[in-house]
Amino acid sequence: MIKINALGDVCPIPIIKAKKALEQMGDGEKLAILVDNIIAVENLQKLCKQKNYNFSYSKINDEEFEVIISKGIICEKTDETYDTSKKPKEDAVILITSKYLGEGEEELGQALMKNFIYSIRENDVWPSTVIFYNSGVFITSKQSQMIDDLIYLEQNGVEILSCGACLDYYNLKESLKVGSITNMYTITEKLLSSKKVIKP
Amino acid sequence: MSEKIFCSNGGCTAKLGAGVLSHILSKLEKNINDENLLVGYDNKDDGAVYKITDDIAIIQTLDFFPPMVDDPYLFGKITATNALSDIYAMGGEVKTALNIVCFPEKMDLNVLGEILKGGMETVKQANASLVGGHSINDSDIKYGLSVTGIVNPKYIYKNNTCKENDVLVLTKKLGVGIICTAKKMGEASKIDFDNAVMSMTTLNKKACEISKKYKINACTDITGFGFLGHLNEMLDEKFSAKIYAQNIPVLSGAKKYADEFFITSAGQKNRNYLKDKVLFKNIDFALEEILFDPQTAGGLLFSINENDADEFVNNLKNEGVDAQIIGKVIKKQNYSIMVEE
């Protein structure tokens, strides 16, 4: 992941910095850019919309926003019956708080989780956001086998968020493979504003 | 003079957003009732108009900016052109101006000399007098004018009194904010920048004088809130407007620089403020950005009876004023402004 610190930069500097970095990057590569105001986030979003880049952001505090941009892998259209990128999204948050699904044997829990993530991907309706915290963050980092499914969901507009404090605790911050880092403030905001919260 | 000044987010891009401003203004106490105060705080006009006699009213206005260009002389000229514009937008004549100066004491005073020279020349061009001013030692440069003009109270142009079926006429081309931003980043070509400077140093005097032969229903100058922001004020939630995208006059290079994302926060603030009010029908990104772009020393937007519009525009063009019919005032719709191909 390429990182740019644009704190203190006035528009259009953060946008031009991001644009130049992205021009040098290949498909699937990610750029994380820190900016200090929401207007800069919105201007970056316009850049992504025009250039067809994937965009997500998280608010770290009032004066720090992290924007994650990646160049999309262009999915060749196959003879599938429907265009998966147009799947409807439910205003729902799926909250994953552990690397195991359900209570019982760990091995079974892990297998069930893998199946669960795969099933989200294959479902006809997608959630708007999937949030990972506590040991759930193992799923979004390098030790997980579910990365491909999550990347696919993210590229099709499902927001994937991992708790920053949890990544820190498990020493996984550098290993995050999909989605962006968030904080408890954003997590609670998402939970309160969404129509449905699903905790498997 | 090779001295350059630090050019931050200058000109009209430095304005506070309209959203923030109207929130604060709505909470202030109302003024005392003075029947001679014809245009004041309660109106959203930039200038205030106070009636002295039945035929004479004074217009007061002021504007000041951080630098939007790095040449101090041009900065002085552009800022003065912008400050005088409010008088013309109300149909007045400029009479006197006072300098407003913030300048770092330790900086080369010749720089200040160049700024003031640019301001003085512009005031002279307007056939008015520079009569004094006030200066402050400050960490950054800011310059502007407090301007007094006169107008016949019966013929004041207000900015929000357009009528249904009026035709909208715009003078000057749009895009100076984006071009200055590209210039600041070292990416604007000389010719594009020179054209923008030419536009920003052209007084709205002639356009205003010609307009006096006609019945103008409303007039405003295009500055910090961008074309769409000022048009929205003109419509005043009472009417809507249809804008013909292909007629919008755009400075050379502006579209290219918008496509390269030389866009400011002020432009995005304008977009946020008008988000639900503007409908774009098949309009490309660059033109959208230009329509939201804050203009420093922009042109005048007139709302004029449809029967007079063609003659008015021809008259303006014959006198060398860049002018276009760009839209029409219609009955209030769901959207205030519809920009069409």
Image (cartoon, grey):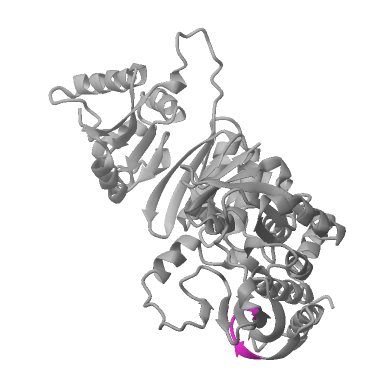
Q: Determine the residue positioned at 43% across, 56% down.
A: A64
On screen, A136 above or below B309?
A: above
**The furthest residue to the left:** A104
In the rendered image, residue A66, in percent from the top left (x then y), is placed at 45, 49
- The image quadrant where one finds the C terminus of chain A is top left
How many numbered dots are placed on residues in this image? 0
On screen, B94 above or below B296?
A: below
In the rendered image, residue B288, in percent from the top left (x then y), is placed at 61, 45
Verify whether residue B134 appears in magenta. Answer: yes
In the rendered image, residue A68, in percent from the top left (x then y), is placed at 48, 42
Residue placed most toward the observer, B3 or B37: B37
Residue range of the region highlighted in magenta in the rendering: B133-146
Q: Determine the residue positioned at 63% across, 90% down.
A: B134
Verify whether residue A44 appears in magenta. Answer: no
Residue A48, image quadrant = top right
Q: Is residue B7 visible?
A: no
Residue B314, image quadrant = bottom right
Residue placed most toward the observer, B153 or A161: B153
In the rendered image, residue A198, in percent from the top left (x then y), is placed at 22, 30
Q: Is residue B133 left or right of residue A60?
A: right
Give the main secondary structure, helix, strand or loop, of the magenta stretch. Answer: strand
On screen, B2 above or below A121?
A: below
Residue B2, image quadrant = bottom right
Q: Is residue B53 left or right of residue B125?
A: left
Q: Determine the residue positioned at 65% across, 47% down.
A: B327
